[in-house]
Amino acid sequence: MEVPMLYAGPVVPEPPKMALEERWERLLSNFEAKTLIFCTFGSECVLKKDQFQELVLGLELTGLPFLVALKPPMGAQTIESALPVGFQERVNGTGFIYGGWVPQQLILRHPSVGCFVTHCGSGSLAEAMVNDCQLVLVPHVGDQIINARLMAGDLRIGVEVEKSEKDESFTKEDVNKAVKALMDGDSELGKEVRANHAKWKEFLLAPGLENYYINDFVMKLNNLM
């Protein structure tokens, strides 16, 4: 027996009604447009310490400014205590590590943000797709993995960080490679991904998009009845 499938359409995030706090605005405004890497993995993801260190070292390797907002990794009381030796001194003024909550949606909208390193949660992807930041994908569990395959594979609007087939771990070189693929202006992959992202952003922000999908859903539901 064939079961019909009805699509309710995408859920587009509402534009934020508040302004970015002065401390974040002051920090982000220090950097040129589309040069900053913003990395956050949501409220539930906790990395192993070695993977946390590979992540931040990979961002350092890019030579670009970055803001990382993550929970302390496994076995660490604070995010600062888990940082590699000498890391803070090397990135002073260009790399910022924060262990608390950040206004993700507002930060993604800031002109300085050019790349978003994300765990591929549905909400985070939706917020990123209606902004101009490029997507580096680091999925961890469940639907995040499916989301990453969709973004990097079918839609071609992001680059997934390569992982070891043996234990699903990544290295600093893997992180650096994925970011550079998008942030390098001469990269053919980066050009393709940026173009695709721009098309999807335009589609998602089209006036009346959600109303169209809901009306179509209701109409097809009535036909089935």
Image (cartoon, rainbow, N blue to C red):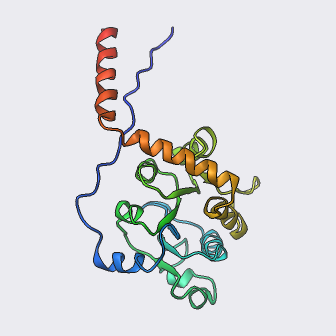
Q: Quadrant of residue 6?
A: top left
Q: Quadrant of residue 207?
A: top left
Looking at the image, the residue that sits furthest to the front is: 186
Which one is nearer the viewer's eye here, 161 or 35? 35
Look at the image and tell me in which quarter the C terminus lies: top left
Q: Position of residue 11 (x, y in %)?
A: 36, 40
Q: Position of residue 187 (x, y in %)?
A: 69, 57
Compared across the picture, whether 16 is left or right of 198 comes to left
For image coordinates 42% across by 66% down, the residue present is 111
203 w.r.t. 64: above or below:
above
Compared across the picture, whether 48 is left or right of 70 comes to right
Which one is nearer the viewer's eye here, 30 or 126? 30
For image coordinates 33% across by 21% down, the residue present is 216
Looking at the image, the residue that sits furthest to the left is: 17
Compared across the picture, whether 47 is left or right of 165 comes to left
Which one is nearer the viewer's eye here, 162 or 134? 134
Q: Position of residue 191 (x, y in %)?
A: 63, 52
193 w.r.t. 18: above or below:
above
For image coordinates 29% across by 20% down, the residue present is 218
For image coordinates 63% across by 68% down, the residue present is 51
Which one is nearer the viewer's eye here, 130 or 53? 130
Looking at the image, the residue that sits furthest to the right is: 166
